[in-house]
Amino acid sequence: MNELKLRSATGRTGGLVIGQGSAGELARGYAEALRRPFLAVEEPDQALRALDLAAARDGSAFVLPAERELGFREVNALMGRGRELNLPVGVLPLPADPADAAALVDRAVALHAPTPRHRHRSLYYTDFRRTPPAERPGVYGSAQSGEFIEQLRSGAEAVVLHSHGNGADFRVGEHVLCLQVDGLKPAPAQAGEHFLPCQGGGPCRLDHKSGFQAFHGARAVRARLLVLLSCSAYQPHDGLLGARFQLSQQLLRGAHVAGVVASTRINHGTPQLGVAVAQLLQEGASLGEVALRVNRLSAQGPASYVCLGDPDLVLPPAGATERPARAPVAAAAPVRTATTPAPAAARPWQSTLDLLFAAEFAAATGSARLSGRLAEAAVAAMRAPTNATRLDTAQLRILAAAPEEAWQQLCLPTGSRPDGRCPGCGGQATETAYAAVLHPAYRRTVRRCAVHGLLSDTPAGAANVPRGVRHDRADGLVRWDTGQLSGWCTVVGEGGDSGRRPSPVPAGAGSQRVPGPTGESVTLCHTAAGAFSRIRVFTGAPGPGGRHG
């Protein structure tokens, strides 16, 4: 790192600003205006290496490169390294025209302060559910798309939009947000540019659709912070759409939007993930932290979400009053040097995945209220290790009443293999592995018998699963080993919840009486901070094939 020159303002108030190549002078001015540390680099690889410095000392990194120097390779590398370092990273690609680039940076300075500017604090809309996915103000499903558009036009400090999109237009129920509608639409495309047919004088791709009430342009998006949980909402320089033909980048040139979180590729999200993201912003997370937390939910493959703009952008504090705008861009501060430290430690994320999947499971069984509460608990787990056990008993009641493997619509099988014998009939048992469609890092393992069906259903590789489960015929108790087991348990007779279910007991109790007359088996249900298990016990027999013994 010795060849990199670090400029640092005294009394700095935010993360490291990295100016790359020709964007260095404007980036230096941005850093000085906001009293931020500054680092000048020449090449993308140097900017990538600078993230290590920011991770240990500055808490975030804001990279300003020329637009033409930010392709998929560079974006993937920056966001992927940020994920490895647990570091919020933002990028602001600057256009080739010097006047346009300077105006974009000046605008970023002016909109940086978390000063209240709009009527609403937060709005969240999902196009993938007709009813609101959480019972709180400012949350909308597709059946309320008209109301959401009305509130969006009236202004919000933060908006989370979960919708189909392609970078230039986004479906909002019976409405469409479309870059081609109002005065912010780009000039007609020229030969050699990347654009949609309608942006070059051709037909609209939605002409054949008859169900839309209205199209709304970029000026309808009156929000300072915007999270687009959609496909390809931002495309780098070598993408299918040029920068000026993308809604997200045109919004950054308008009057309201200071920063955007957007995906660079086709991806999947859920209404409950949107609830969690909106809550994360409400609780004071920065825009860069939001992108980081969503990217950390999938440890494999490229980091999909990018923070376009300063990663330190946050909502105004609740009840805040207006403050004066920051000073214009000024000259940079003196030079100092630093060495590269070791990477920051990453946080565990399994509890977040457990809670998000539990939220999906609750929604699939019709419990919208619990689903929203589980998504809120996932927010806490995103930000710091947490013991989210307060919802265990509510989740346990849903689990006990739900059909076996009611979550299967949320997962895909990834492989099966023979696995011991069924303790009920001695026949061959089969183990099948599953991965969640929307959170691929979340896995489950299910054992079945051709005769008796489900034998066990547990999180893959989890340590907090009941083991040594057996039925004691002498005293009618189902017992299990306690060890380090946490959470709550309940025993359910054949046929599930038929009104005879006992009250949940702490997992540490180690036993519970069978709920009244039963058939040849009962099922032990267990929940702990979003994680859940079902283990079938044959009366008078040990647990399923010794699997949990």
Image (cartoon, helix red, strand yellow):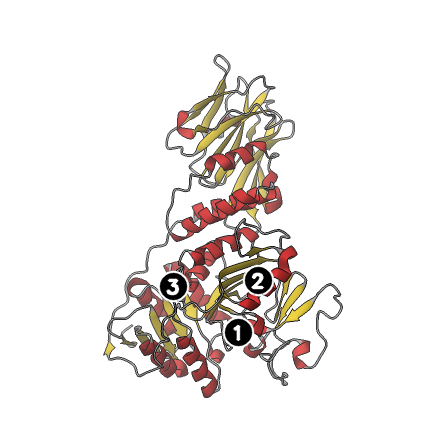
Query: Which callout, 3 or 1, points to the residue nearer the camera?
Result: 3
Cα distance between the residues tagged 3 and 1: 25 Å
Read off the residue under disc 1.
251
Residue 228 place in picture, x, y as percent? 54, 63
Q: Which residue is mark 2?
A: 230
Query: What type is the residue that disc 1 sits on?
Result: Leu
Position of residue 450 relative to residue 303, above or below, is above
List the residue tagged with mark 3: 320
What is the C-alpha distance between the residues marked 1 and 2?
16 Å
Residue 109, x across and y down, in percent:
39, 76
Q: Amino acid at mark 2?
A: Ser
The answer to whether residue 472 is above or below residue 545 is: above
Q: Is residue 249 left or right of residue 380?
A: right
Give how far across and how far down residue 163 sits, in percent: 60, 61
Q: Quadrant of the N terminus?
A: bottom left
- Front residue of 545/435: it is 435
